[in-house]
Image (cartoon, rainbow, N blue to C red):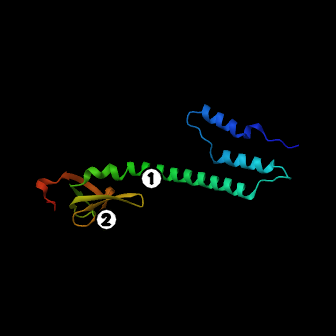
Amino acid sequence: MNTIDSTYYLENHIKKRDNQEAGTLGKDDFLKILMSQLQNQSPLDPMKDKDFVAQMAQFTQLEQMTNMSNTFEKYFNKSEGSVAEYSHMIAKEIAYFPEEQSEGDRGELKSGVVEAVSLKEGEVFLKLDDGARVPVSSIQEVRNNRDGDQHGT
C-alpha cells in the first residue's frame, strides 16, 4: 500500500512556515505536494480533471506573481540608482563633449541646460534645452544656471 510521506502534508508545511520568520510556500513546495497527490491517488477514485486544472491554475498564478515581484524588484533597484540619482541636475547647466567627436579629438565643449533625465537601454541620458540628448558619461562640468538663463553662456 502506498502512503504519503508526512513531510508533504500541508499542515506540516504551514507549521514549518509559521516557524520561519519570512518563509512561505514556494512553487517547489507546491509541485512536491501536487506530485505526491498524483502518485498516491486511489486508482478507483482518481483526481478529477477539474481539480487538477484548478491546482495547475493556482500554480501558474503563483509563478506569475513571483516573476512579477522579481521584475518589480529589479526595476526599482535599477531606477533608484539611476534616474533618481541624476534628477538634481534638472535646471543645471552642463558642459559636455559631443558624442560625434572621436575619443582622440575631443574638440570643443558644448553646453546646455538640463530639462529632463531619462533611462534608455540601461543608460541615463540628460535632455537639454536645445533638444540634445547627452549620456551622463559625457558630462565634463556642472554649473548653476546663472540668472535663470535658459540657454547657457
Between disc 2 and disc 1, whose residue precedes? 1
Task: Indicate the amino acid at tag 1.
Answer: Tyr
Name the residue at 26% across, 55% down.
140
Observer-nearest of 44 and 104: 44
Residue underneath mark 1: 75
Residue underneath mark 2: 99
Horizontal side, residue 3 vs residue 26: left or right: right
Name the residue at 34% across, 53% down.
83
Say above or below: 87 vs 106: above
Horizontal side, residue 107 vs residue 31: left or right: left
Distance (Cα) linking label 2 and label 1? 28 Å
Quarter residue 139 falls in: bottom left
x then y, percent, for residue 81: 38, 48
- Crowding at label 1, few (<14), some or many (≥20) Cα neighbours within 10 Å? few
x then y, percent, for residue 103: 33, 62
Name the residue at 88% across, 43% down.
1
Observer-nearest of 28 and 83: 28
Residue lying furthest right in this view?
A: 1
Horizontal side, residue 132 vs residue 74: left or right: left
- Mark identifier at residue 114: none
Observer-nearest of 79 and 34: 34
Task: Indicate the amino acid at tag 2.
Answer: Glu
Image quarter in which the C terminus is found = bottom left
Give the SS element for disc 2: loop
Name the residue at 75% across, 49% down.
35
Residue lying furthest left in this view?
A: 147
> What number of labels is visible?
2
x then y, percent, for residue 92: 21, 54
Can you tell which of label 2 and label 1 is closer to the viewer? 1
Horizontal side, residue 83 vs residue 96: left or right: right
Give the SS element for disc 1: helix
